[in-house]
């Protein structure tokens, strides 16, 4: 029975995997979840996608979808009961542009803010200043998002693909220094994030599962 399900290789805290699980959950598409240890990836994952990042979705016919945004689009194009692909005030191109900025420039600043020690060639010895510089750069983007959230969500009064693609990354940024984040004048952004984190959709995709290879237990979502 479960052999007929799409298989998602995932890592619980990875924001890319999170956005894939969010879209799969919203679509109602059943799938088998395989929690991965990034330092010890299962051979099955690497055989499906040698680049070795998560998420990777393997369909029953062998098709491999190995970009998180493509997993979201695959799921939502099959079933999109909440209308994430058609929000009130945005075209698909506008949503994809926002996701592109998030995955490019914002992710670059997020990584350097969160893990400043990983960039000795860039930080010129002052890791603290380097982290704060990238926090400032990321904050400019978050202020822009705050300005877009007047109706509660990025493109109107309900969630869209763009909201769910961005929220896991904004969450990481926020939790890097939660006290600092809470002190910023971004009331809409803070409410957007805390509403998301308090919601059932988020809770539903953040369950803890033992690594797949250790247990071989089948986790059906
Ligand atoms: N562009 C990819 C990026 C996915 C990605 O970088 N995932 C990270 C985890 S958050 C990963 O698997 N890194 C490989 C590793 O850490 O070994 C996507 O959108 O799916």
Image (tube, helix red, strand yellow):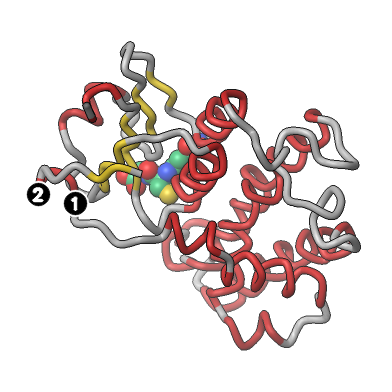
Mark whose residue sits in front, 2 or 1: 2
Q: Is residue 164 above or below residue 110?
A: above
Give the x, y percent position of residue 93.
80, 28
Secondary structure beneath label 1: loop
- Visible residue check, residue 126: no
In depth, the one of 43 and 190 nearer the eye is 190
- Disc 2: which residue: 215
Q: Is residue 23 left or right of residue 170?
A: left
Give the x, y percent position of residue 205.
44, 55
The disc label shown at residue 195, or none: none
Give the x, y percent position of residue 100.
69, 38
- Visible residue check, residue 218: yes
Give the x, y percent position of residue 157.
84, 55
- Viewport quadrant of the N terminus: top left
Q: Alpha-carbon neighbours of circle 2 within 10 Å: few (<14), some, or many (≥20)?
A: few
Q: Is residue 129 above or below residue 113?
A: below
> Which quarter of the frame holds ligand 1?
top left
Secondary structure beneath label 2: helix
Image point 65% across, 51% down: which residue? Answer: 166
Q: Alpha-carbon neighbours of circle 1 within 10 Å: few (<14), some, or many (≥20)?
A: some
Q: Is residue 218 above or below residue 186?
A: above
- Disc 1: which residue: 211
Is the CB of mark 1 within 8 Å of ligand 1? no
In depth, the one of 128 and 50 nearer the eye is 50
Q: Is residue 181 left or right of residue 168?
A: right
In depth, the one of 137 and 221 nearer the eye is 221
Q: Would you identify the image quadrant in which residue 122 lies?
A: bottom right
């Amino acid at each position: 029975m479960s052999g007929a399900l799409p298989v998602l290789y995932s890592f619980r805290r990875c924001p890319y995997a999170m956005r894939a699980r969010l879209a799969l959950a919203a679509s109602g598409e059943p799938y088998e979840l395989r929690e991965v240890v990034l330092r010890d990836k299962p051979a099955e994952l690497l055989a499906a996608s040698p680049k070795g990042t998560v998420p990777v979705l393997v369909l029953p016919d062998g098709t491999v979808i190995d970009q998180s945004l493509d997993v979201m689009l695959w799921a939502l194009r099959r079933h999109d009961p909440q209308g994430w692909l058609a929000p009130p005030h945005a075209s698909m191109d506008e949503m994809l542009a926002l996701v592109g900025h998030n995955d490019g420039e914002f992710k670059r600043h997020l990584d350097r803010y969160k893990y400043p020690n990983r960039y000795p060639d860039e930080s010129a010895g002052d890791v603290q200043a380097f982290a704060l510089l990238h926090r400032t750069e990321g904050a400019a983007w978050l202020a822009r998002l705050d300005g877009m959230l007047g109706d509660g969500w990025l493109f109107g009064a309900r969630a869209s693909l763009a909201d769910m693609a961005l929220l896991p990354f904004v969450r990481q940024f926020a939790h890097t220094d939660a006290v600092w984040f809470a002190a910023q004048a971004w009331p809409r952004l803070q409410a957007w994030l805390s509403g998301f984190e308090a919601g059932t959709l988020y809770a539903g995709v953040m369950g803890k599962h033992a690594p797949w290879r250790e247990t071989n237990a089948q986790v059906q979502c």
